[in-house]
Amino acid sequence: MLSRTADHLFWMARYMERAENTARMLDVNYQASLMPQSTDEVEKGWKGLLGISELSDDFATRFGVVTPDSVMRYMVSDERNGSSIRNCLQAARENARAVRGTLTTEVWETQNQTWLEFQRMVASEAFLRDPSTLFEWVKFRSHLSRGVTVGTMLQDQAFHFLRIGSFLERADNTARLLDVKFHAVESEYHGFSNGSAAAARDIEVDFYHWSGILRSVSGFEVYRKAYRNVIRPEKVAELLILRADMPRSLAACMQEVVTNLKMVANEQSTDTLRKAGRLQADLQYGRIDEILATGLHAYLTQFLERVGTLGVGISRDFLVPVAA
């Protein structure tokens, strides 16, 4: 396969996954902002969302004060924000158009229709009155895109590059979400339990905090089925890091990345495949108590660095070289 074709397929899948993850985080944050709480707590939640995407500085430069409406516009429809849902869906559609002949008609029409419908929905800014409807729609279109890909495409190299892009992006987003959300709780409550007089309130706040994290990755019902007990931070971390049977966990994502990398491997990709396999093995045989003992923030920071290195390796071995 031509490297340029592989590049378009890889990034088409990544941008579609990124749009979905952004919609997930915005939806959970919006729902949380409707709960009774102080203005400072609401603002802290929106700042955390910007931090996940490493957009805090850009937002502060352009908008200054953090408000729900300004963050919503910035993350949904802002043309100057490369990570906005608008730009992600447009980039996914443009990458699909560039390799139209490689895709099935159903896959192309799904991408194209998603972009056209999104433009119509955002033009009226009706999403500001009912943001959750738009976020659910974005998630549905992403699910549809993946389903049509699996259901209609030949499982050849094109299919494998699409899958690599999807799961590499998902791993990155899940790790960022965990890092920011856990760090916020540790900063505010000084760890997972402090035994203070405010413990009852902390437990109540923690429930909504952790359930919000789980809902952002469609993991609330999965958690109940897997653990059948109250929501505990260490179990949330275990579910989203080490459980390979949880579709959006780091372990599940890396399992898919390695499986599909093996299908497109060539002579120059040996080192990249080795790094991916080692990262998968660390997740497969890791223990949550060891991860928490050494520090979750340090672990996730290192994971993000390794995923970033893996992405560079994939670009070097298969895709269009990035200009230095």
Image (cartoon, rainbow, N blue to C red):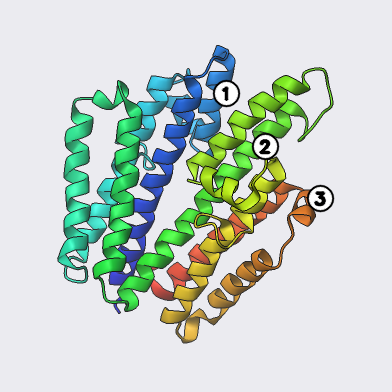
Residue 58's place in the image compared with 221, above or below, is above
The residue under the point 58% across, 63% down is 244
Q: Amino acid at mark 3?
A: Ala
Residue of label 2: 183
Do the residues bearing badges 2 and 3 touch, measured as CB atoms within 8 Å?
A: no
Q: Position of residue 226 (x, y in %)?
A: 61, 52
Q: Secondary structure at mark 2?
A: helix
Q: CA distance from mark 2 to mark 3?
A: 15 Å
Q: Earlier in the sequence, mark 1 or mark 2?
A: 1
Front residue of 218/121: it is 218
Q: Is residue 85 visible?
A: yes
The crowd level at tag 1 (other Cα within 10 Å; few <14, some 14-19, many 20+) is some
Residue of label 3: 293
Q: Amino acid at mark 1?
A: Lys
The crowd level at tag 2 (other Cα within 10 Å; few <14, some 14-19, many 20+) is some
Residue 59's place in the image compared with 105, above or below, is above
Q: Secondary structure at mark 3?
A: helix
Figure disc tally:
3
Q: Position of residue 62 (x, y in %)?
A: 41, 25
Q: CA distance from mark 3 to mark 1?
A: 27 Å
Q: Which mark is residue 44?
A: 1
Q: CA distance from mark 1 to mark 2?
A: 12 Å
The image quadrant where one finds the C terminus is bottom left
The residue under the point 65% across, 64% down is 283
Front residue of 214/186: it is 214
Q: Residue furthest bottom?
A: 267
Q: Earlier in the sequence, mark 3 or mark 1?
A: 1
Query: In the visual, does 171 lie left or right of 204?
Result: left
The residue under the point 25% across, 47% down is 90
